[in-house]
Amino acid sequence: MVEIESVNKIFQTKEVETQALDNINLTIDSSEFVSIMGPSGCGKSTLLNLIGLLDAPTSGTIRINGTDISRMNDKEAARFRNKTLGFVFQNFHLIPSLNVTDNVELPLLYGHVPASERKGRVEEVLERVGLSHRAKHFPAQLSGGQCQRVAIARAIVGRPELILADEPTGNLDSRMGEEIMNILLQLNQGGVTIIMVTHDERIAAKTGRIVRLLDGKLV
């Protein structure tokens, strides 16, 4: 599913050059659930952003399903993200002025999915994450765990092959974190590949493989 070859990422200002990732080589198979762990500043989120086409490597190659994503232009990257990837973030990134249904429907609008199909898909994923009864609520009316469920519904409504989750349980208490993790495990059991950044060893232990970074290197 994901092939990363000799990837480096350097952030440069006038005063300083920082090597965030140093010669990363990593392969993730289809239907794997992989955790990326390491101390703050080790490059975890940078690596996830590169896989998600939110940034580009300084050098090296990243392929998803055989497609080289490393040098895509903005339009190509946006189209690829919408079709292939789903994102779940620690801070949810829901739009406060939109209700649950409208937040979940957004990726389908960007993907030009017909209105008749959008309605059915949104209802399906809200049922899957247990939030059908909150469809018309706004983010401010939901708990943190419910907001994260909405974010997961939004991530899967486009039926992606790969979900990228950046600290999806980081802002939740242990009980809600377990609930969110169980949803991700169910998705993985259904064949979705998941790459998750986490600081929580207990959460990471539930995944199929743990990849550790230190100072931008795989260890």
Image: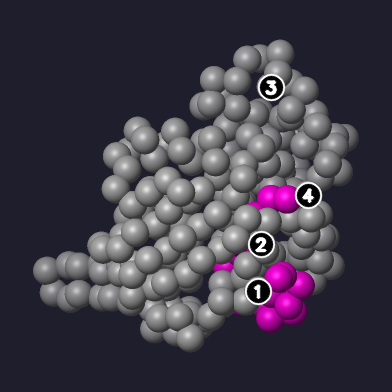
- In the image, is 119 to the left or to the right of 70? right
Q: Is residue 181 visible?
A: yes
- The Cα–Cα distance between marks 4 and 2, rounded to whole angstroms, is 11 Å
- In the image, is 46 to the left or to the right of 56? right
- In the image, is 24 to the left or to the right of 187? left
Give the answer, above or below, for where 23 lies relative to 140. Answer: below
Q: Label 3's element?
A: helix
Q: Which mark is residue 209?
A: 1
* Of the image marks 4 and 2, the number of the one nearer the N terminus: 2
Mark 2 Cα shell of 10 Å, populated few (<14), some (14-19), many (≥20): some
Three-letter amino acid code at the position of disc 2? Glu
> How many numbered marks appear?
4
Tag in front: 4 or 3? 4
* Of the image marks 1 and 3, the number of the one nearer the N terminus: 3
Seen at 32% across and 43% down, the residue is 72
Q: Label 4's element?
A: loop
Q: Please name the residue that numbered disc 3 is placed on.
A: 118
Q: Which mark is residue 190?
A: 4
Three-letter amino acid code at the position of disc 1? Arg
Q: Quadrant of residue 30?
A: bottom right
Residue 154 placement (x, y as % from top left): 66, 39
* Of the image marks 3 and 2, the number of the one nearer the N terminus: 2
Seen at 74% across and 29% down, the residue is 122
Instruction: State if disc 1 and disc 2 touch (CB < 8 Å).
Output: yes
Q: Please name the residue that numbered disc 2 is placed on.
A: 32
User: Magenta residues, as a range?
Assistant: 191-208
Mark 3 Cα shell of 10 Å, populated few (<14), some (14-19), many (≥20): many
* Of the image marks 1 and 4, the number of the one nearer the N terminus: 4
Three-letter amino acid code at the position of disc 3? Arg
Residue 136 placement (x, y as % from top left): 77, 29
Seen at 39% across and 73% down, the residue is 24
